[in-house]
Amino acid sequence: MKTNPLRTPPRWWAAASGGTGLIANAFLVLFYLTAQPWTGNAGDGWFGAANDVLVLIQYLALVPVVLGLGRLMDGDTRARVWTGIGLVAAVAVIVLQALLITGAMPFERQVVAVSLSAVLTMCWAGAISAAGTRTRTLPRTVTRLGRVVVIGLPIALGTFGIGALVTAVSGVSWAWAAGGIPGFVVWTLFPAWTLLLATAPSRPRDRPTADPGRR
């Protein structure tokens, strides 16, 4: 019988993180549809606040997943490095979201740091998926989606940069939001990857005897 590569508790955390993240993204869509922040006079509403809280919960649940995958691939050097990076980035998101929610840090000061930290966690997903391929510990569906996430990142950053530039140069207020659509897609694929990690069975083949990532 095919079994999930993660032990039961990390698998539950992966399901919690992925499911919460997808719900958070739904609230983010509702926020943009109702508040329309590109108009310049939009109110915040409760959709944005709900998204902030759910992202905090998403990343709290992600920490055991990062650690669980790190233990699963502890013989792979690059996986160990990326486990450290993913853990630091996830904790940074947690701290920054907590500061935002409590009012200790305004959104204007928090957004850049939390965005960079979130991007690092998505890079971690791509790197740990690659490690899962090398060590044959993760299902192909998981590793493929992880590669899609990390490949989509530069595309998303590029389109957002173009949209922001158009807004700055031409004054088209909604261009930055339109440019951010690919980024939202990638941001949605990340919790989908986590949820898939919780439900997918392990690869139907043996692990290699010699880990190519070991020094």
Image (cartoon, grey):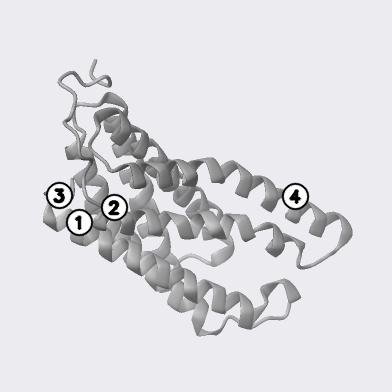
User: How far is the residue under mark 1 from the one under mark 2?
Assistant: 7 Å
Of marks 4 and 2, the one in the foreground: 2
Considering only order in the chain, which callout, 4 or 1, is on the residue closer to the N terminus?
1
Considering only order in the chain, which callout, 3 or 2, is on the residue closer to the N terminus?
3
**Does residue 181 appear to the left or right of 74 in the view shown?**
right
Q: Residues within 10 Å of mark 3 (few under 14, many from 20)?
A: few
Considering only order in the chain, which callout, 4 or 3, is on the residue closer to the N terminus?
3
* Residue kind at label 1, given as amino acid type: Arg
Considering only order in the chain, which callout, 1 or 3, is on the residue closer to the N terminus?
3
Quadrant containing the C terminus is: top left
The residue tagged 2 is 197
Q: Residues within 10 Å of mark 4 (few under 14, many from 20)?
A: some
User: How far is the residue under mark 4 from the one under mark 2?
Assistant: 33 Å
* Residue kind at label 4, given as amino acid type: Ile
The picture places residue 128, in percent across and down from the top left corner, at 33, 38
**Does residue 195 appear to the left or right of 36 in the view shown?**
left
The residue tagged 4 is 162
Mark seen at residue 3: 3
- What residue is drawn where x is 20% and y is 56%? 11
Q: Secondary structure at mark 3?
A: loop
* Residue kind at label 2, given as amino acid type: Leu
Q: Mark 1 near mark 2, Cβ–Cβ under 8 Å?
A: yes
